[in-house]
Amino acid sequence: MLEFFKINDPFRMIGILILFILLQTPYYLMEIPTLQPEFIWKLLGQQINSGDIPYVAIIDNTGPLSAMVYWFNDILFSNSWLSFRMIASAIIFFQVFYTNHMFIENNAYDESNYLPAFFMLLLYQLSFDFMTLSPALMGSTFVLLALSKLLSQTSVNTNTVPSVLLMGIYAGIAFCFHFPYLLFLPLLIFSGLLINGFSFQQLALILTAFLLPTAFCALFFFWHDALSNFIEMYFTLALKLEKIYHVTYKDLGYIFMLPLLIAIMGYLKNNILRRLTVNQQKQNQLFLLFLIFNIGMFFLMDRVSPFQFISIIPVLTYFITHFFSIAKTKLVQNVLGYSLFLILPLMGYSWTFYLLNDNSFSSYKLENVGTYGIPGNEKVMVLGNDLAPYQHTNMASPYLNFRLTEIYFEKMGKMQRKTRFYRDLKKEQPTIIIDEAGVFDDWVKDLPKIKPLYTRSNNGLIYRGNQE
């Protein structure tokens, strides 16, 4: 099988596609439930499709371009579970092809073949949540495009202006998909200064190009009188959110430790055992810097889960392929290649199987059965982080991200907060309010037109109108 991918032939991607389908089959057979972030993205698309504007009528910090994708997906496919998987699979297949093409085009290895695509495909099997349509996955496509342009600058006699402009624009688009990708702006600057020797004009061009996509998003929200909300929720308040740990550090270590160790060994062997050209030395340094910045994104995440680190896959692919290709004999290469072919997917399958049978998975999956027994035709507002009641009811709330809502309300004055809540209730007209956070009484205090409309029942739910 390894010999099949050692040939520089684009039709090898057909083999990659078949292998991709085969390796994904166990995940489909495991019947992985809907994840909490997936449900949030689905609700976001539904609300935008109903006419609500993000950051104004929807309190959430999902990237504006990601929100647009969920809106279109809701129009076309109702943000179904299958559409999330199919679109994500198409994006991943494109990334595998483009990454391999990028390595060949920039002479990253002594031999041009499709082994990087093979190893990259294996790395995507490390976690089941890599295969969902996350903002991190969508944004990572543009991170990859920016990386390609940055990599082209390691070559001599290249026209730098178009590449510098495009790498800034691509990185800016990635940031508009996923906030932690903001970290790639300093990555471009540092790598440009330390590795490629960019001039001040080139650095200024990168910064300007990076800001262009954000400026277009800001112009859209300015047009809808929502610029301050966009800046506040996507930039300032998002940094104040406490992290939600969907998985533990132990889980992350189990998934990424082996690939990281092999990648580090690949980097060291690349520097010690090979005579590198100047371009290859720059590439090695660039990917090491890229690896460090990828790990640093942890500090900008509001949710800790494997899919947040998906942009690290091309970097691991680069070093792991070097680790494999430096092996001196064909026997050693076969042992290493087939070992990775067996171990990497099995790590993902075993971790998923463990998680599905462990109580800790409740912090990541969406509970299928609500605890309130609310009829499906009711308009429900949840004041809390548990979104499960929205599965079979009509969402009547702008508070999609309640952690962000609390921070947003806390910065307001008392009367401003009550006015906002009053307007939200008048607009949404929920028939049932689930006061999980216990804030309803405080928020409706001194609101004589609202408080008499709702009564708290014995089961803890707050109903519109009197209940027997």
Image (cartoon, helix red, strand yellow):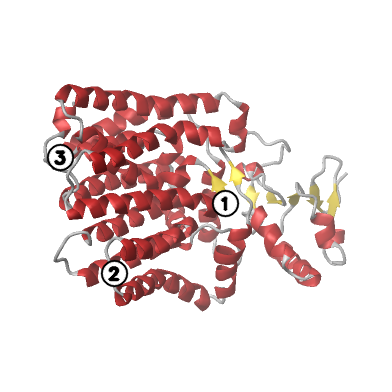
Q: Residues within 10 Å of mark 1 (few under 14, many from 20)?
A: some
- Please tell me which residue is depicted at 24% across the width and 22% down the height of the picture: 335
Task: Label 3: state its secondary structure.
Answer: loop
Residue, disc 1? 302
The disc, 3 or 2, on the residue closer to the chain's N-terminal end is: 3
Marks 3 and 2, how far apart at CA: 31 Å
Q: Is residue 82 visible?
A: no
Q: Is the residue 358 above or below the residue 73 in the image?
A: above
Single out the residue that lies furthest toward the front: 272
Mark 3, residue position:
113
Label number found at residue 198:
2
- The crowd level at tag 3 (other Cα within 10 Å; few <14, some 14-19, many 20+) is many
Mark on residue 143? none
Q: Nearer the viewer, residue 37 or 446?
A: 37
- Position of residue 84 measured from the top left corner of the image (x, y, whole percent): 42, 44
Residue 93 x/y as whole percent: 29, 43
Foreground residue among 52 and 31: 31
Location of residue 333 with respect to 191 vertically, above or below: above
User: Disc 1 to disc 2, how far (Cα)?
Assistant: 33 Å
Going by the image, does 145 lie left or right of 1? right
